[in-house]
Image (cartoon, coloured by chain):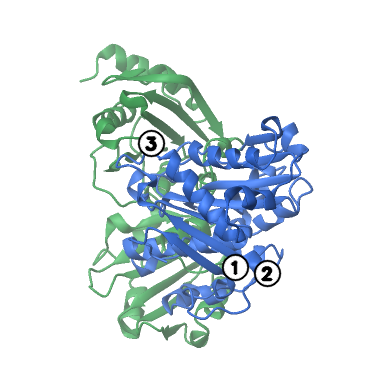
Amino acid sequence: MLSPSFVLLFGLLMPQAGGTVTDFSKILPKSILGWEAVQKDAVYDRQTLYDYLDGGAEVYLAFDFKQAFVRKYSGPGQNEIALDIYDMGSSAEAFGVFSCDRQDEDAGIGQESEYGPGLLRFWQGPYFVSVTVGGDEREAEKAILALGRAAASCLGPAGEKPGLLQCLPPEGLRPNRSCYFHSAINLNNRFFISSENILNLSRQTNCLLAEYGQSPAGPVHLLVVQYLEEGQAPAAVESFLQSYLPQGRETGAAQTDNKKWTMAKVYKNYAAIAFDAPSREWAEQFLSSLQFQEK
Amino acid sequence: MNKVITRREFVRGASWAVLGAAVRFPGDRQDVSPSSRVVLIRQEGALDASSKVNEEVIQQMLDEAVMRLLDQDSPAKAFSLLVRPGEVVGIKSNVWSYLPTPPEVEGAIKRRLMEAGIKEEDIGLDDHTVRTNPLFQKATSLINVRPLRTHYLAGISGCLKNYIMFAESQPDLHPDSCAELGSLFLLPQVKGKTRLNVLCALTPQYYGRGPHHFNRRYVWAYKGLIVGQDPVAVDAVGLSLIMAKRRQELGPAQEIPPVPKHIRIADQKYGLGTSDLNRIELVKLGWTDGMLI
């Protein structure tokens, strides 16, 4: 249990909306299970994140990333643990960056988490956190999990997931395989559709990619894109059909080479595409069951 | 808009055709030019059980690969075809903390450069500061060496991407899956200077997760070096290896690391080399277990 003095300190120092993640420097443990903080803590923003993440910065910049706090810990065998706390601007964005890379087992840390050898990921409120080790994962596992719990206790209250998730029909949904994002880079790393941005995705679009069913033939993938304006959705679907499904330009649906069906629909400012449905009728009924909110 | 490559082409197995290459290395090669020869050499003893690099074996692998690449019977003769005494040579390495160029590989290259008549003080070894490094600014030859791994934007990080540190602005090269990486080879500091490309496939990384795109679960002890004078051909071979491993471990749906279009563009737009596996002479030497390609 946390002591009253810690709670008071935490309340005073925890970064508030519009604040800075540098305050984490004062409240995060400098030592944990024999691992000691080394080097100076670092903070990166949208301009400097490239200096820290080689090739991965765009993944965060495609969301509403604000700042990242980084602390390194040194332990046995010259192993190094990196604690990264990303202020994503909102809980929806923090959930989004977490959701795009899910693969491991729940670790019970923060609002949602996962742990696989050498990599802990979780989100809480507007923060996404990763704790990684570059060397021996077994030696670092206890420290990684303890550090994650310590960090989670500093992140403040829970936040809401994106409202767009409510459009998903619950039946057959695999929640741990649903992700929220904005840009083509996130889509293609999860479910490659095209080498070009044929759906005109950008930071202004809100997207869901969800998996349905446990069929041995593979899941049905559902892509939902919320555009700012109504006119953008039909234009995007037309572009998609032209490049991806030219034989379906008239009807919005076609059977693909794997004998499954792909169908695209527009509802006001939303585009919805079902990939690899077992039949045209199934796809039609499935897309009709989406519960879109007015924009 | 560039030619659109969709998931459907991948499902049909035609991805390599639209990327500008064949789906597999063919039995009958066509119009292979000497510059598109690539040597893949592997030795079981290159790494021990804890992935520690064996310096002696690495030297032997590099020597054998370069000799075969240039049809020479000694390392000295082979390297003397790459550089001349009196030259200034920059070794463009890679210091990415999770998977850097092994010092043993850098050392093996440097040793042979010195034997070819390059003074030690005229050999530079650098990564992040090559653009402003005085030695690299006056270098007359470059050696390009780095590990093979996947990359969130570019699909793979290979020899083409290794030169991004020569760019004034690296983020400027990031749009559209780093499509224009080939332009780096036309920069005045680089153009016409690359004598050898060494893509380290000792412990390649076939998949990436987390902010740093690295986790040891996704590297494997392949114990190879991919060596050539054509950076496009070297990267095309590296990509084919990554794809084969992804197919094996992740399944056909995730075979392609999205989206390695920069290799085809380096060939077709910038004319830097050959991306079509039909037109690459791949010479395979050494250990054959788990070759994959």
Q: Secondary structure at mark 2?
A: helix
Colour displayed for chain A in the image of the structure: green
Residue in the picture at 44% in, 77% down: B13
Report the Cα–Cα distance between label 3 and label 1: 33 Å
Q: Chain of mark 2?
A: B
- Gap in Å between the C-alphas at discs 2 and 3? 38 Å
With B72 as the anchor, is B85 left or right in this view?
right
Badge 1 or badge 2: first in the primary sequence:
2
Q: Is residue B67 visible?
A: yes
Packing grade of label 2 (10 A; few <14, some 14-19, many >=20) is some
Amino acid type at image mark 2? Gln
- Tell me the colour chain B is drawn in: blue
Q: Which residue is mark 1?
A: B275
For disc 1, the chain is: B
What mark, if any, has residue B268 been given in the picture? 2
What kind of residue is marked 1?
Answer: Ser
Q: Is residue A51 above or below residue B183?
A: above
* Rendered location of residue B150, percent (x, y): 47, 53
Q: Label 1 neighbourhood size at 10 Å, few (<14), some (14-19), many (20+)?
A: many
Determine if marks 3 and 1 fall on one subunit.
Answer: no
Q: Could you tell me the amino acid type at mark 3?
A: Gly
Front: mark 3 or 1:
1
- The image position of residue A201, as x and y in percent, is 55, 61
**Residue A236's quadrant in the figure?**
bottom right
Q: Nearer the viewer, residue A183 or B173?
A: B173
Query: Which mark, residue A134?
Result: 3
Quarter of the image for residue A49 reads: top right
B90 sits to left or right of A209:
right
Q: CA distance from mark 1 to mark 2?
A: 8 Å
